[in-house]
Each structure stands twice: as structure tokens, then as C-alpha cells.
């Protein structure tokens, strides 16, 4: 199972893969790409993209959602440029299994040290 952790935009490292979610007025998109130093130039290094278009029916007051995977980048750009603006953008970093195991071991070591210092075996940091 893949694990993604949200990170702030100022912590992006050039040449690293990220999952980016954009929420706009007309669409919600998720794409995985390699960050190249410019957040608005991510389509040049696009690896995978899924766009969910929201179409509101004025007469029935219902919302239809359409998921689409794009192979043609010109279609991606036309969909993206046709939206008014991006309301919010979230960037996620993929955590590998080795990093998760190492983090769990470090957390356990910290807990053991603090339990010995405090003297309470049930203490968890």
C-alpha cells in the first residue's frame, strides 16, 4: 500500500516525485509528476493524471462527476486553462516502506528512552 504525506509547497525538492491535488471551481484533479522547480510547470514532467469534472445540472440540481485519465497533454492543458482558477492545491510526498520502518523504529526508541527517564512503562510520546 502506498502512503502519502502532505507537505508544504516550500519544502518541495527539485527532481522528486510528488502527488499533487488541485481543487478548482470546475474540476478536481490528481496527478503524479516530477517537480522541476516551478509549481505551475508540472505538466512538462507529468507521469499520470486523473481529472474529475463537476457538471452541475441547473434543472435537476444534481452534480455528475466524470473521471478521466488523460494521455494527451494538450487535453490536460485545455481542461486546466478553461477553469477559472485553482482554489487550493495540496502536495503529497510518497513515503517508501524503508522510510516507514525506520520511522517506526526511531519512534519506538524515543518511547523506550522516555519511559526509562520518566519511570512510567505506559508512557507513549
Image (tube, helix red, strand yellow):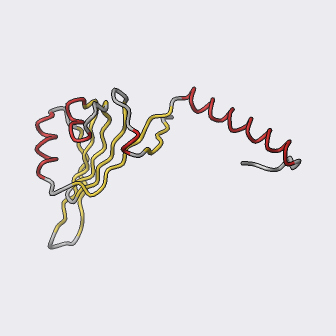
Tell me what residue is drawn at x 48 percent, y 42 percent. 5
User: Image check: 59 left or right of 89?
Assistant: left
Q: Position of residue 96 (x, y in %)?
A: 51, 29
Q: Which residue occupies the foreground of this view, 26 or 67?
A: 26
Q: Say if 49 sits above or below 59 in the image.
A: above
Q: Which residue occupies the foreground of this view, 50 or 107?
A: 107
Q: Which residue occupies the foreground of this view, 73 or 87?
A: 87
Q: Say if 125 sits above or below 42 in the image.
A: below
Tell me what residue is drawn at x 56 percent, y 30 percent. 99
Q: Position of residue 18 (x, y in %)?
A: 37, 35
Q: How many marks?
A: 0
User: Image check: 37 left or right of 10?
Assistant: left
User: Image check: 115 left or right of 10?
Assistant: right
Tell me what residue is drawn at x 33 percent, y 46 percent. 21
User: Image check: 102 left or right of 111?
Assistant: left
Q: Position of residue 106 (x, y in %)?
A: 68, 34
Q: Position of residue 36 (x, y in %)?
A: 28, 30
Residue farthest toward the right in the current orientation of the protein: 119
Q: Quadrant of the rendered structure where residue 71 is?
A: top left
Q: Which residue occupies the foreground of this view, 91 or 66?
A: 91
Amino acid at each position: 500500500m502506498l502512503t502519502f504525506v502532505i507537505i508544504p509547497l516550500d519544502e518541495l525538492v527539485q527532481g522528486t516525485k510528488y502527488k499533487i491535488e488541485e481543487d478548482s471551481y470546475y474540476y478536481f484533479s490528481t496527478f503524479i509528476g516530477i517537480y522541476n522547480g516551478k509549481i505551475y510547470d508540472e505538466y512538462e514532467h507529468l507521469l499520470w493524471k486523473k481529472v474529475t469534472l463537476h457538471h452541475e445540472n441547473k434543472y435537476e440540481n444534481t452534480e455528475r462527476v466524470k473521471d478521466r485519465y488523460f494521455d494527451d497533454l494538450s487535453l490536460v492543458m485545455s481542461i486546466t486553462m478553461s477553469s477559472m482558477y485553482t482554489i487550493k492545491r495540496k502536495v503529497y510526498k510518497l513515503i517508501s516502506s524503508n522510510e516507514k520502518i525506520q520511522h517506526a523504529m526511531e519512534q519506538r526508541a524515543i518511547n523506550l528512552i522516555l519511559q526509562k527517564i520518566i519511570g512510567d512503562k505506559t508512557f507513549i510520546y
